[in-house]
Every structure is written in structure tokens, then in C-alpha cells.
Image: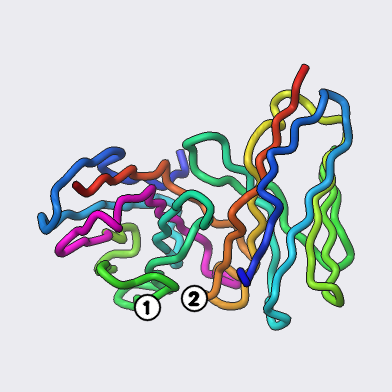
Amino acid sequence: RKEVEQDPGPFNVPEGATVAFNCTYSNSASQSFFWYRQDCRKEPKLLMSVYSSGNEDGRFTAQLNRASQYISLLIRDSKLSDSATYLCVVVKSASKIIFGSGTRLSIRP
Amino acid sequence: EAQVTQNPRYLITVTGKKLTVTCSQNMNHEYMSWYRQDPGLGLRQIYYSMNVEVTDKGDVPEGYKVSRKEKRNFPLILESPSPNQTSLYFCASSLVAGGPFRDEQFFGPGTRLTVL
């Protein structure tokens, strides 16, 4: 079993829709959690950190559930420009930075 | 402009021919790291460095070497490349405060390596 698992998708949703991704992790000692966005053949870029209290940045909301060991990302009112691959990242230590394999999202007009 | 640069961006080589991929950052970050990205496997950490002259293995270090003689540079060396090292490679850097635990990692544009 992978240490970090994501549904690979692709998720194909219409513009304006709300879409949610989950990411599960197996190491309960994990300390930090992030969502990164990666456009095709480009480098990953930080979308947002994920805190136990949840955090929101505009149309994006991230949640952490330590008890069930998953993190989630919610995108409201999706835009064409949201089409990308979303990577969840779970950090236990400097040598234990685990990236999920990514969830592909495609927004259609 | 704050950035991480990698060179070359694309490289096709043959088995056994030593190569170096350079990585440089201009943000005075102490933490630097190398990853490889393969379809279905996500990014996997090869080596990382907490500071100058301090390097350590990540998840997939076999076949790779690194050095950190200066804060800004963190080259990745493949002494004898093999076809299973064909991959997309990313260098990343991060502030020392909490290292990668809480801080954003800034990635270079990637190096696409093909080993024939």
C-alpha cells in the first residue's frame, strides 16, 4: 500500500462546478500537509498548506482529518484555469516528504 | 527574480556516460532537494541537503550523488546512468525555518533525462 494515496482521476467537470479531492496517508506521525498544483510538464507550485483547523483561500478550502488520516481539497466555482494535476504532500521529516501521484482535473466550458 | 534554475532542461545520453544536472537558487534558502517524477509514482525524493556540506539520502538515492559546496548550488550527479534513470527531475529549495516541514518548496523547471 502506498504511503500517500490519491484518486488519479481524471475528474472532468463543467465550469462553475464544485469539486473535491481526498488524499489518504498511512503514517500517523506525519507533521505537515500541503496541496501543490502542477500544470502539464511544469514544476509543482504550492497551492496551500493544510491545517487541522482547516483553511480557506478564495475558492479553495483544505481540511485535515488526523483521526481518519486524510486531507481534502475543495474547489468552488471552478474555472477553466483550474485545470491541472493536484498533488497532496505529507511531511514527516526532511527525509520523509511524500508526494501523492496526483489527481488530474479538467474543467470544461 | 526569486527562482530555482536547472540545467540542462533536456538531455539524451547513453548508458554509462557520466552526467551532472546543475541546480541553483537565489533565495538564500538553506534546504535543497532533488526529486524524480515518474508516471503513476509521483515525485520521489532522491537526496536532500539541510545546509552547506550537509547532505543525506531520500527515498531513492541509488545511482545518484550530490554535493553542496555552496549554499546556492546543489548539483545532481549520475556517475553511470542507466535506462531506469530515465525520468523527469526536479530540484527544490525551501527556507530553513521549519525546513520543509512547514515551508513552501520552490521547484526548478525540471530536467527531462533520457538514458538510452
> Label 1: how many residues lie within 10 Å, few (<14), some (14-19) or many (20+)?
some
Residue stretch rendered in magenta on the structure: B76-99
The answer to whether residue B79 is magenta is yes
Q: Amino acid at mark 1?
A: Asp
Which residue is the site of mark 1? B56
- The residue drawn where x is 39% and y is 44% is B110
| Left or right: B114 as drawn, with respect to B100 | left
Camera-nearest residue between B83 and B67? B83
| Whole-number angstrom distance, CA of label 2 to CA of label 1 | 8 Å
Residue B27 in sight from this viewpoint: yes
At which x and y percent is residue A72? Answer: 81, 56
Left or right placement of residue A14 versus residue A28 in this view: right
Q: Quadrant of residue B33?
A: bottom left
Q: Which mark is residue A95?
A: 2
- Give the x, y percent position of residue B8: 25, 41
Q: Give residue B19's position: percent from left, percent from top.
A: 16, 54
The circle drawn on residue B91 is none
Q: Are marks 2 and 1 in contact (CB under 8 Å)?
A: yes
Foreground of the two, A54 or A26: A26
- For image coordinates 65% across by 66% down, the residue present is A4
